[in-house]
Amino acid sequence: MNNWEVMERDLKVNWHPCTQMKDHQILPMIPIRRGEGVYLEDFEGNRYIDAISSWWVNLFGHRNPYINRKIKEQLEELEHIIFAGFTHWGAVRLGERITQLTGLDKVFYGDNGSSAVEIALKMSFHYWKNRGETRPLFFSLENSYHGETIGALSVGDVGLYKETYREILLENRTLPIPADQSEEETVKALTQIRQIFERETQTPTGNPISALIMEPLVQCAGYMKMHSPQFVAGLAQLCREFNIHLILDEIAVGFGRTGTLFAFQQADIKPDFLCLSKGLTGGYLPLSLVVTTDEVYQAFYCDYKEMKAFLHSHSYTGNPLAVAAANATLDIFETQPVLEENRKKSQYIWEKIQKFKELPNVKEIRQTGMITAIEMIPYPWQERRGLVVYQYGLQNGVLLRPLGNVIYFMPPYVIDYSEIDQMIEVAYRGIELAQTQKWG
């Protein structure tokens, strides 16, 4: 079996996500045979540094020995059960650990990030409904992205994903974001948002807003735009003041990506709902959590005849294998100085990428924790300059998957300093090449 054979057979049967499949007439697909640490290896022995953690999910490397062992141990005992009316020890342990780590009270299980967002939106709306209020409107931020199911798309603001489906989406209002992380821009945005809250919540029939949803600190699929902890804290204060739920989408930014275990900890706040996925299982298996408060839980807790239960379910809710991976991931955080080492590596990356400022086609560099972005000047999207960087990266052993004109690093935490050097150097040369080359 070689790369070409696997690719040809794949293209006959598979439709890949977030891809214009016709591109693969000229852009070779990369069939991966195995992974180890930060590396992915194809069928011909070529290795690629996984600088994007396979869509931001992998924390401790591919085929991590400890996570492997814990999943194998679980496999020998129980692979799956219905999570309605039944439970298992792994889910109990994970729920206890997550509530202790977040300061929240109850954990509701889902399958993936988008389903977590759907659960949180429904749960917020249903909470108000159970209290005798109908609140069909949601707030989200400009430039935001929260997934690609209908509800999640509704509260996003990246037109590339959303525009086609606009006629079938939920009602949502977008709020301005700071132009940068300065105090002046933060205050300006919060002042504008206060005015919007005042206008939108004062209606003859009462407050129509169920919740505000946001990614704290970094809008990942929103071209890696970053904002300050003060902005997050200010939004939380406004939500409390205007009696609106705060949903924090930490699907991509949780579990150490921003420098703390959870991004909201840097703002010293407590959300009403916290959505977790991706790194939750170390990049092994699909699992998501919606973590919420006793106050929300009690709005659904009643005699059956009152019909206030939250009737939402997924077949693989609380899957024991995925839960075992999540518990193993938390074990690593508990037993190893992960966040301390990440801080050292992120500082090293920041120092190394200063040279990108020398490139005339680089507009800005920015970083929050282990998330680093290099934004090129605004080339016309039709030129697909980011794809030039992507292709150059693959030719030189690094998987970079730019977001338009934004090249970013979100590597597994086990990356070493020589691998960081290679990742940065290849990205630099790719961006340099994109000055003179466009795709096609």
Image (spheres, rainbow, N blue to C red):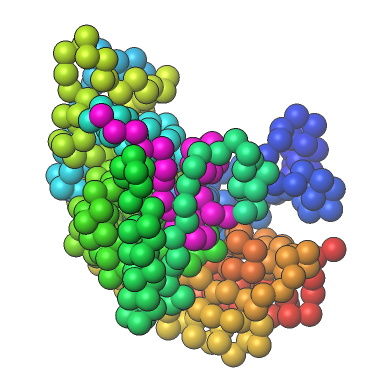
Determine the image quadrant of residue 176: bottom left
Nearest the camera: 385 or 170? Answer: 170
User: Residue placed farthest to the top in the image?
Assistant: 305
How many badges with numbers are in the image? 0
User: Residue placed farthest to the front in the image?
Assistant: 204
Q: Which residues are magenta?
A: 132-158
Q: Is residue 140 magenta?
A: yes
Identified at 65% across, 53% down, the residue is 160
Horizontal relation, residue 2 to residue 140: left or right: right
Nearest the camera: 288 or 279? Answer: 288
Across and down, in percent, residue 56 comes to 47, 52
Horizontal relation, residue 242 to residue 426: left or right: left
Quick check: can you spot residue 349?
Answer: no
Determine the image quadrant of residue 187: bottom left
Residue 172's place in the image compared with 144, above or below, is above
Which image quarter holds the N terminus?
Answer: top right
Residue 56's place in the image compared with 281, above or below, is below
Horizontal relation, residue 113 to residue 306: left or right: right
Across and down, in percent, residue 300 comes to 22, 25
Across and down, in percent, residue 71 comes to 35, 32
